[in-house]
Each structure stands twice: as C-alpha cells, then as structure tokens.
Image (cartoon, rainbow, N blue to C red):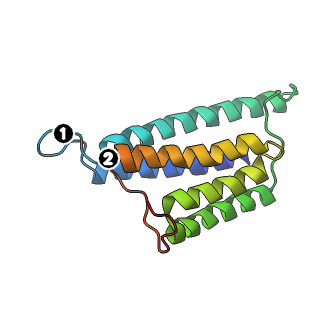
Amino acid sequence: MRIAFLVAVLGGAVFYSYIAFIDLNFLTRTGRLGPGFFPRFIGVGMALMTVWAILDALGDRRRVAAGGPEGDNDAPAGTWSDAVLLIALALGYAVLLRLFGGFVATLVYLVVTLSLLNPGRHVQNALVAVLLPVGVYILFDRILNANMPPALFDILPF
C-alpha cells in the first residue's frame, strides 16, 4: 500500500513539475523572478524525495521478503479502508477549500486528519493544526502578498 501511495504521489509531483516548467515563466521580461520560480523547485524537490521514499520502501520490502525482521519505524500493514479514508479526507479538504478558503479549510482538515491518523497526541495535533495554517497565511498573504484561495463564505475578517 505504501509503494502504491508513493507512486501516486510521484505521478502528482511529475505533473506539477511539468506544469511549472511548461506553463510558468522562470523569469519575467524585466529579469525578476517569475511565477515559475518556486513551483519548479517545489516540484523537482517533491519528485526527488518521493523517488527516495519509494527506493526506501522497496528496500524494506526486499529485506522482509528475504526473511529479515521488520524495522522499528516500519509502518503497520495498511488496508484498503485506510486508502479510502485518505481519499475521503482529501476530497473533504477540496470541498472545504472551496467553501471556506485556504486558512479555515486547512485548519479543519488538519484537526480531523491528525485526530484520526495520530490519536492520543492532542497537544501535538493542536499545535500542528493551528501553527501550520497560521505560518502559511503569514508567509503567503502577508510577506509574499500572494492571496490564499478565496472562499464562497467569508467567515474570517482577513
């Protein structure tokens, strides 16, 4: 299941990188960094890290198949219900993103996802669920002046 998930992520990373290289300019006409600067680095980095994770997963699989012990940090065996849960969470995030915008959708998504996938660590989950959207909002909306995804229902004043 892990390898199938990573291959799907790799497909998304390659598609993202393709769009960044084909459709977005690296530099503007005036020589300043263009809209393709960050997406190119993010896409290539995401693809390289995913390939690395796939190779690591294949190595773990070969070791266990050869009769070796499972590693301490190996994930427990996943089931199709886990995959369906992750797909449902991603679709729910897409709906929330359209309805409530980037900040609220990310906050709600992280609270729900972390409570399901990281049970028992309430303080850690709360900190990640609050600090990550706040950090993204400050970075993109305030520092880089790139607006967060708009909402159909504006429930926050910013």
Could you say which is closer to the camera, residue 96 or residue 33? 96
Labels 2, 1: front one: 1
Q: Residue at x 37, y 56 (%)?
A: 147
User: Tag on residue 32?
Assistant: 1
The type of residue carrying mark 1 is Arg
User: Tag on residue 21?
Assistant: 2
Question: In the image, 142: left or right of 131?
Answer: left
Q: What SS does tag 2 mark? A: helix
The x, y position of residue 154, in whole percent, is 48, 70
Classify 10 Å Cα crowding around label 1: few (below 14), some (14-19), many (20 and above): few
The x, y position of residue 93, in whole percent, is 60, 63
The x, y position of residue 155, in whole percent, is 52, 69
Q: What SS does tag 1 mark? A: loop
Could you say which is closer to the camera, residue 7 or residue 90? 90
Question: In the image, 41: left or right of 121?
Answer: left
57 is higher (above) or lower (below) than 87: above
Which quadrant, please, contains the C terminus?
Answer: bottom left
Residue 10 seen in render: no
Quadrant for residue 77, please give it.
top right
How many numbered circles are shown? Answer: 2
Sequence order check, earlier mark of 2 and 1: 2
Q: Residue at x 69, y 34 (%)?
A: 58
Q: Residue at x 63, y 32 (%)?
A: 55
Q: Give the residue at the far bottom of this rendering.
A: 152
Find the distance from the CA under tag 2 to the CA under tag 1.
17 Å
Question: In the image, 112: left or right of 152?
Answer: right
Q: Residue at x 50, y 43 (%)?
A: 135
